[in-house]
Amino acid sequence: MLRILGRASSINVRKVLWACAELDIAFEREDWGTGFRSTESAEFLALNPCAMVPVIQDGDFTLWESNTIIRYLAANFQGLHLYPAEPQARARVDQWIDWQASELNRSWSYPFMSLVRQSPDYQDSTALAAGIKQWSKNMEILDRQLEKTGAYVSGEQFSLADIPIGLSVNRWFETPLEHPHLPAVNAYYERLSQRPGFLLHGRNGTP
């Protein structure tokens, strides 16, 4: 039985939960992180020195870093339909997974902390406006890609890349800001909402 450590409200934990739903992987999840058991404890740090969720344990194998985890799950649990073995097809999937982590994720940081978490440390109006502008620019990049594929982020078929990207789109719509009209993103959001795993772990009211 796969063991998942991390609170279910964490966007990075939800990547793993959604991947498990797509791959029909049975798991047990334990609450760790904000509001639950501390990731700064010696027990948790022995599993992940970065003190971040999620962590998985598959037998005696321990792994952290959410995008690495979902790649591992697809590779180890017959997920070639999500993460193809052919090098160019896999590279297209990896490209968008990495873009989400390096560009899209970074751009929402300030607006999310300001508008959703309402942190007093993130209330500078100039920084907020700059963050929203960059986030919107990245969502426009995504909209153009989805307009080109007509379906999912790396092509015509749902892939592993749609898990982090789909959760990012959910966060976009759940953050109270003025959203530019992005018809391909809107259609993509509704397309993802036909997947039970996304309704459970993505479009579930949690930003």
Image (cartoon, rainbow, N blue to C red):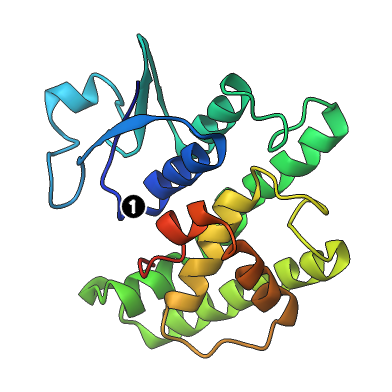
Q: Quadrant of residue 45?
A: top left
Looking at the image, residue 177 lies above or below residue 152: below
Residue at x 36% of width, y 70% of height: 205
Looking at the image, residue 62 lies above or below residue 196: above
Q: Is residue 87 shown left or right of residue 128?
A: right
Spot occupied by residue 13 in the image (x, y as percentages of width and height): 38, 45
Towards the viewer: 80 or 93: 80
* Quadrant that contains the C terminus: bottom left
* Quadrant that contains the N terminus: top left
Q: Amino acid at mark 1?
A: Ser
Q: Is residue 84 shown left or right of residue 26?
A: right
Residue at x 32% of width, y 39% of height: 53
Residue denoted by label 1: 10
Spot occupied by residue 20 in the image (x, y as percentages of width and height): 47, 37
Q: Is residue 53 shown left or right of residue 36?
A: right
Q: Quadrant of residue 206?
A: bottom left
Towards the viewer: 121 or 13: 13
Circle 1 SS class: loop
Q: Quadrant of residue 183?
A: bottom right
Spot occupied by residue 125 in the image (x, y as percentages of width and height): 39, 87
Looking at the image, residue 66 lies above or below residue 174: above
Spot occupied by residue 88 in the image (x, y as percentages of width and height): 87, 34
